[in-house]
Amino acid sequence: MNTGDFTVIAYSDSSYNEDFIKGNKKIVEGEMLSPDDTSYKIVISEELADENDINIGDKIEFKNTNDESITYTLEVSGIYSIENETSDNMGSRMMPNSTNQIYSNLTVLNKIIDDDGTSEDNFKVMQNVTAAYYVDYENIDKFEEEVKDLGISDYYKVMTNEEEVTSTLNPIKNISSFSKTFLIITFVVGITILTIINLFNIRERKYEIGVLRAIGMTKLKITLQLVTETVMITIISLIVGITAGTLLAQPVTNYMLKNEIENYEIEATNMEENFGSKEFGMMRGPKNKPNDMNNNISYVDELKAEIDSNIIITLSFATIVLTALSSSVAVLYINKYEPNKILQNRE
Amino acid sequence: MSILKIKNLNFSYNNNKKVLNDINIEFEKGKIYGIFGKSGAGKSTLLSLLAGLEKTKDGDILYNDMDVDNISREKYRSTVVGIIFQSYNLLYKYTPLENVILSMNIAGIKNINKKEKALELLNKVHINEEKANSKVLHLSGGEMQRVAIARALSTSAEIILADEPTGNLDKANEDEIITILKNLAHKEDKCVIVVSHSENVKNMVDKVFYLENGKILDN
Ligand SMILES: Nc1ncnc2c1ncn2[C@@H]1O[C@H](COP(=O)(O)OP(=O)(O)O)[C@@H](O)[C@H]1O
Ligand SMILES: [Mg+2]
């Protein structure tokens, strides 16, 4: 029997168990204890298990370092591997290396504390007092202050499910930022391509203008014809663009939102693997909270994509500016140069 | 009676170097004229002035004794003269037929079946209906130049101006083009002026002018 310094860790709520949530530690055999568990069970590290040849279901005897006459017999229900060594867990300074961290439940931990007779200051005991308050989202910051003012001891931590509420919007926030980036990229690429096409087009246009002028078409007629042509193309492009946009906006939005939500759900699945139990995979955000009837966050999964008149006006305006810009170059050629010059320049 | 007169014409581009120096020529209907000279002699400049593509500054060009400067530039280019360029200058996005009809539209021709007239003109320069309806880009150089001639004739212009019309063509095509131009003068009473430096062309025209350093040489 190994008698090193062990740290016994227990959580009243799985959401405090950051090492497992972040994936620094991971169950490789058996499963993590549920916070509600009251049996004398523990979860130990892979190294500890290997070194002492311990398997799931084995019962181990521990001695209390303060009073060696006190022993505890605990059954191993899970074995974890250390994926990433972290320096700090729960802010404790007296933490030995994480190989010697033993996870158990509050029943076991309280028993050890009682036997020790040590001051509670040495331990961080996390237990939840559950009471439900509904606070307006805007007043959420003031809520803690108000509760403290009412005389609750500092011993209690006041928590809100703000994160949980806002996290339901995470997929939408992601899509929003993605859309902005995409819009900027589209615009830059679009303008570049249009400019290049126009540069080639102007060469062709210059020749056409030269020929038309040489065989006697008036400047006004050429200008009108050119502008009419450009305006027609612009209108057709706008109609096609807006129609396609309207038809595709909702399906694309739905698809992107579905993808985002799936990503979040994959994260939950990873957690399920780290804890070695399905129960934990369902959990995201602190447990035992007022609205915790079900542990599964249901993300906002409906986003209405609308193309309103504002967007159409902006779009049309941008198109008109680009059209005017490109046709004004051609109009410049029509008015500035005599046909001889335009045709000569070509050869 | 001369249809076109050049009187005391001097010309220089913006750099002030004299390109044309005191030119005096009279052109008549029913004749084909050749203007010859070395490269840079000023032949194209002279033809551009006759075509109304360049404006006179010193001296006059008279059409039926009327100063060309008093006629609207566009009207003059679209109805008085028909221009044929060395590089054809057809619009490639259209068919030969459409090129000819476009020219008729610009000239404001009405009250006739333009398509029929255009096909007739194209037929006269040996472009059949199938070719007339294909893309210009699919034609050979000789064919393109014949389309350009049909275009020049489409507005019933009395004066046909051609700047090196056979410059890009082989001998057989050159003969064909010059024969067409000659017939226009002799059979249809047009005034045809051809700029060239081909000996072959020299032998086919009615009258030859030599241009050297901007001056007409007496021959
Ligand atoms: N647009 C122009 N601007 C200035 N100089 C020109 C222009 N076109 C022609 N020239 C000059 O005028 C002279 C005559 O040119 P051009 O009439 O084209 O001769 P040709 O047709 O006989 O070869 C040349 O010296 C040429 O460099
Ligand atoms: Mg020339």
Image (cartoon, coloured by chain):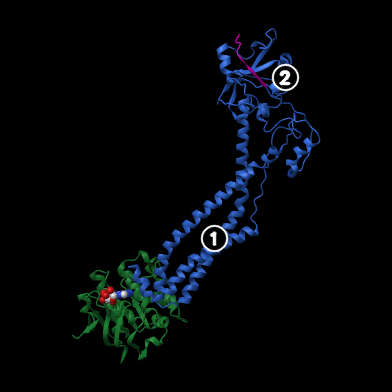
Q: Position of residue A129 (x, y in %)?
A: 77, 29
Q: Residues within 10 Å of mark 2 (few under 14, many from 20)?
A: few
Left or right of B6 in this view: A194: right
Of the 4 image quadrants, the one containing the C terminus of chain A is bottom left
Q: Which chain is blue?
A: A
Kindly identify the amino acid type of the residue bearing the numbered disc 1: Ser
Q: Main secondary structure of the magenta part?
A: loop
Would you say residue A58 sits in the magenta stretch? no
Q: Is residue A245 above or below residue B173?
A: above
Q: Are marks 2 and 1 in contact (CB under 8 Å)?
A: no
Say how many tags the image has. Answer: 2
Residue behind label 2 places its C-beta within 8 angstroms of ligand 1: no
What residue sits right under mark 1 in the picture?
A: A237
User: Is B189 or A184 nearer to us in this picture?
Assistant: A184
x, y percentage for residue A226? 48, 70
Query: Where B93 sits versus B70, above or below?
Result: above
Q: Is residue A37 visible?
A: no
